[in-house]
Image: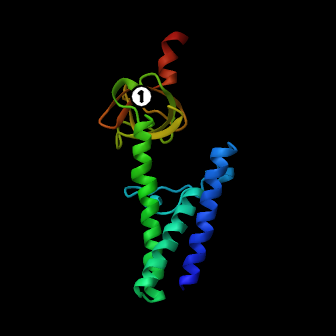
Amino acid sequence: MIYFYTAIVIIAAALIVTDIVLRQMEDIKGFGFEKRLFNFKGEDIPIEKFFPETLGTALFCLFSTGTAGVLLDIIGFRWYLSLPFSVMSGMLVCFFLQHFLQSAINKYKDKTLPKGDKAAGVQGFAVEEINNTGAGYGLIEFEYNDVIHRANAVSVNETTIPEFEKVIILFEEDGVYLVQSIKEVFEPLNE
């Protein structure tokens, strides 16, 4: 089994080095390694962060899986124990890279959700109906600093905003965006 893990480490390391060389020397941006492999999200727990989102992340996952497998095989674990533990270590490395490290990079590059009045004037659209009589919340999608965000929103005028209607953000408070429909903004001008 050590040969299997060693082969995984060598293949993953060779592809990671190839990616780094092409990025630095030839200015080729990942030759497809940044394309997303799947597009699902966990509701409360970010379960998707345990699986590699891109091919580049998959290579780091395979490298850590192989490395953990080699170490566990050297220690003396049987293959039926070393295989699940090495796969779990690869998944933990994926979670660390995609959750903690990516959020730190996004915070450094200011690609996080805008707070307070930083989002004022940003336009987006309602992903689901915003109805203040029911649950009170709806979901909006907007672009801020070249990143597309989804967040909870309420209508500032307490009106129902249908799905896919354009909205303008007025303010953010406690993670909830106060929005107004574009139709409501231009309604007085049409009279």
- Name the one closer to the observer, 132 or 42: 42
Residue 13 in the image: above or below residue 27: below
Any part of residue 11 in sight: yes
Give the left or right position of residue 94, taking residue 36 as reference.
left
Amino acid tagged 1? Val
- State which quadrant residue 43 falls in: bottom left
Image quadrant for the N terminus? bottom right
Q: Residue at x 65, y 57 (%)?
A: 18
**Measuring 43% from the left and 72% from the top, which residue is drawn there?**
88
Q: Is residue 162 above or below residue 7?
A: above
Categorize mark 1 by other alpha carbons within 10 Å: few (<14), some (14-19), many (20+). many
Q: Nearer the viewer, residue 69 or 152?
A: 69
Image quadrant where residue 190 sits: top right
Residue at 52% in and 10% down: 189
* Residue furthest left as drawn: 174
Residue 103 at x, y percent in the picture: 41, 46
> Looking at the picture, does residue 70 appear above or below residue 109?
below
Image quadrant where residue 59 sits:
bottom right
Query: Of helix, strand and loop, which one carries label 1?
Result: strand
Inspect this view and state whether residue 170 appears. Answer: no
x and y percent of residue 131 in the render?
40, 37
Q: Residue at x 56, y 71 (%)?
A: 9
Which residue has dot 1 on it? 179
